[in-house]
Image (cartoon, rainbow, N blue to C red):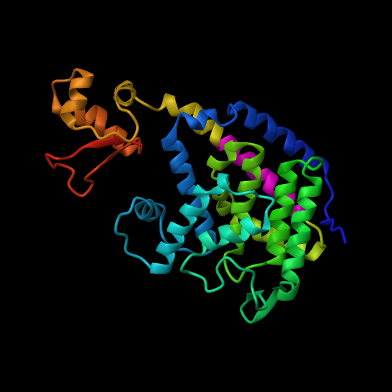
């Protein structure tokens, strides 16, 4: 039987869709981020940190960056593994079909590797949401999960050409949370899969930290979900998500427009003489820039670029080592 998720396209949804479409156009359809790999990487790390923080992962943003960079980070092993898994999962978004149930389960296996017993497979037990001893939401029984997910994905495929991806992905997000198909990682997968659906529409969404806005409005996020549970339809949640996508694009536009403005002339010159992912010694950089003062190089060029995350040291634990090199990232 054909399944139709209960929702109504409201005037507010249409207004937000129009605003979002206009703003994605202004970002020059992904090429703005394509020329700024450090922004892409930093935004991806923000997405991962925020999505995990929503699920009570206690690692800080800097600690998450350290884990991804391969540094030794002190913290719960499960939370460290969650960061590694999430980075792998987000990095593979473009390789998966967001309309494939098999790909959904495969990516859940990546997201929950070594942290969940039923990794990459639908749950076999009952799941609910509790406040104290009181159950406030009971997910559908496990024997219904495969059918419910199949129907949801069939609906997405059927309406892909008639329902805007912004609305479709938000409806999916709510329906997925309602079905709660996995033992663990449902929230992370719902947010990741909405990003995958949006990225299939416009690749710029691979590098927008939508999860950061959700984390910022975490209480409202759960309130919208609860309101939809009570109403039996997803309108409130769809409007919430569209509003947060709109806010994320506002933030991205400010980030991109200010990217060149906040760089000093010296830092711009430094970046001009450094290729990405190539190690440079201080002497090589001084020669390329025509500088004679090591102190000026450190204060005006390398120091500010390190602070902004535009370059990194190959030996971060030995900043004054004679073997130190710098890499543009």
In-image side of 118 versus 162 (left or right): left
The residue positioned 43% from the left and 35% from the top of the image is 37
**What span is colored magenta in the figure?**
235-251
The residue positioned 74% from the left and 33% from the top of the image is 18
Q: If the image is split into quadrants, where does the N terminus sit? A: bottom right
Q: Position of residue 173 (x, y in %)?
A: 69, 55
In-image side of 281 versus 36 (left or right): left
Q: Position of residue 251 (x, y in %)?
A: 55, 37
Question: Of all residues shown, which one is farthest toward the left?
Answer: 322
Choose top left, top right, bottom left or bottom right for residue 164: top right
Asked whether residue 247 is drawn in magenta, I would say: yes
Front residue of 127 and 107: 107
Res 219 seen here: no
Per the picture, the main secondary structure of the magenta-coloured stretch is helix
Q: Position of residue 298 (x, y in %)?
A: 20, 31
Determine whether 83 is above or below 137 in the image. Answer: above
Q: If the image is split into quadrants, where does the C terminus sit? A: top left
């Amino acid at each position: 039987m054909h399944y139709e998720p209960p929702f109504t396209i409201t005037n507010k949804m249409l207004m937000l869709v129009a605003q979002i479409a206009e703003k994605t156009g202004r970002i020059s359809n992904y090429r703005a981020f394509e020329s700024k790999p450090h922004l892409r990487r930093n935004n991806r790390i923000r997405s991962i940190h925020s999505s995990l923080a929503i699920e009570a992962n206690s690692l800080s943003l800097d600690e998450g960056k350290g884990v991804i960079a391969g540094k030794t980070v002190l913290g719960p092993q499960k939370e460290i593994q969650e960061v590694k898994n999430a980075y792998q999962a987000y990095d593979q978004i473009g390789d998966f079909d967001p309309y494939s149930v098999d790909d959904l389960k495969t990516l859940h296996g990546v997201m929950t590797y070594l942290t969940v017993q039923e990794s990459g497979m639908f749950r076999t037990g009952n799941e609910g949401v509790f406040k104290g001893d009181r159950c406030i939401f009971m997910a559908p029984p496990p024997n219904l999960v495969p059918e419910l997910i199949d129907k949801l994905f069939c609906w997405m495929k059927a309406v892909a050409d008639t329902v805007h991806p912004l609305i479709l992905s938000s409806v999916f997000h709510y329906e997925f949370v309602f079905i709660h198909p996995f033992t663990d990682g449902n929230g992370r997968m719902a947010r990741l899969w909405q990003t995958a659906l949006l990225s299939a529409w416009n690749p710029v969404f691979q590098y927008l930290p939508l999860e950061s806005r959700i984390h910022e409005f975490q209480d409202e996020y759960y309130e919208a979900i609860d309101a939809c549970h009570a109403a039996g339809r997803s309108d409130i949640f769809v409007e919430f998500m569209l509003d947060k996508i709109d806010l994320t694009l506002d933030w991205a536009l400010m980030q991109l427009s200010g990217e060149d403005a906040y760089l000093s002339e010296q830092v711009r010159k430094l970046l001009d003489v450094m290729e990405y992912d190539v190690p440079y010694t201080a002497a090589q950089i001084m020669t390329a820039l025509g500088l004679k003062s090591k102190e000026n190089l450190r204060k005006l060029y390398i120091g500010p670029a390190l602070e902004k995350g535009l370059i990194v040291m190959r030996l971060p634990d030995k900043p004054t080592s004679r073997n130190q090199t710098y890499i543009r990232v």
